[in-house]
């Protein structure tokens, strides 16, 4: 990439832990169930995600509350903000039960801190 964009610098990549790993570890869950795929998308693209891909769907970069418009009565959410920091916030439950609460909390946290970075897993629970 450096060759194609004209940058002259050294880059050192240090492997680390992802937000998805911190989210699942903090909630004490696995990212998927046996034999099921994982789909990762953005909040902006969640509405276009197929029902099949929403069985285990990780959402990042959601500027709003896309879970509110992309759930069924069986959709469970594991949500986290500021993952891995002292400000970490976690919530979980069926979207129909906790979706509004998480949306309000997210708005409040954005107001308090001036920014927010959240990640969540949506899973269809049969």
Image (cartoon, rainbow, N blue to C red):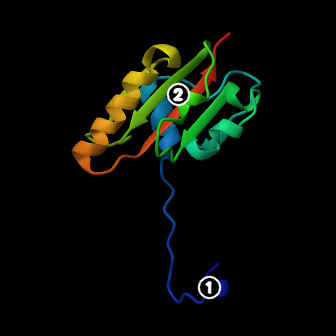
Query: Considering only order in the chain, which callout, 2 or 1, is on the residue closer to the N terminus?
Result: 1
Q: Residue at x 34, y 30 (%)?
A: 104
User: Which of the image's four quarters has the C terminus?
Assistant: top right
Residue most extreme to the front: 69
Q: Within 10 Å of the Cα at label 2, are there few (<14), some (14-19), or many (20+) other Cα atoms?
A: some
Q: In this view, does 11 lie above or below 77?
A: below
Determine which quarter of the picture holds residue 56. top right
Q: Is residue 32 above or below residue 93?
A: below
Q: Viewed as shown, does residue 1 lie left or right of 23?
A: right
- State yes or no: discs 1 and 2 in contact (Cβ < 8 Å): no
Q: Which residue is drawn at 52% across and 23% down?
A: 77
Return the residue at label 2. 68
Q: Within 10 Å of the Cα at label 1, are there few (<14), some (14-19), or many (20+) other Cα atoms?
A: few
Q: In this view, does 124 lie above or below 7?
A: above
The number of callouts visible is: 2
Q: Residue 83 carries which label?
A: none
Q: Pick whichever, 86 or 17, lies toward us.
A: 86
Q: Pick whichever, 58 or 42, lies toward us.
A: 42
Give the x, y percent position of residue 89. 33, 32
Measured Cα–Cα span from mark 1 to mark 2: 40 Å
Q: Pick whichever, 4 or 53, lies toward us.
A: 53
Q: Residue 5 carries which label?
A: 1
């Amino acid at each position: 990439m450096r060759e194609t964009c004209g940058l002259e610098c050294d880059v050192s990549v240090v492997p680390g832990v992802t937000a998805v790993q911190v989210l699942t570890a903090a909630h004490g869950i696995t990212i998927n169930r046996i034999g099921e795929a994982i789909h990762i998308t953005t909040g902006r693209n969640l509405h276009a995600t197929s029902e099949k891909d929403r069985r285990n769907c990780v959402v990042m970069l959601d500027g709003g509350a896309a879970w509110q418009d992309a759930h069924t009565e069986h959709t469970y959410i594991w949500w986290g903000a500021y993952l891995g920091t002292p400000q970490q916030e976690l919530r979980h439950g069926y979207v129909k039960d906790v979706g509004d609460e998480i949306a309000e909390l997210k708005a409040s946290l954005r107001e308090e801190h001036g920014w927010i970075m959240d990640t969540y897993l949506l899973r269809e629970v049969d």
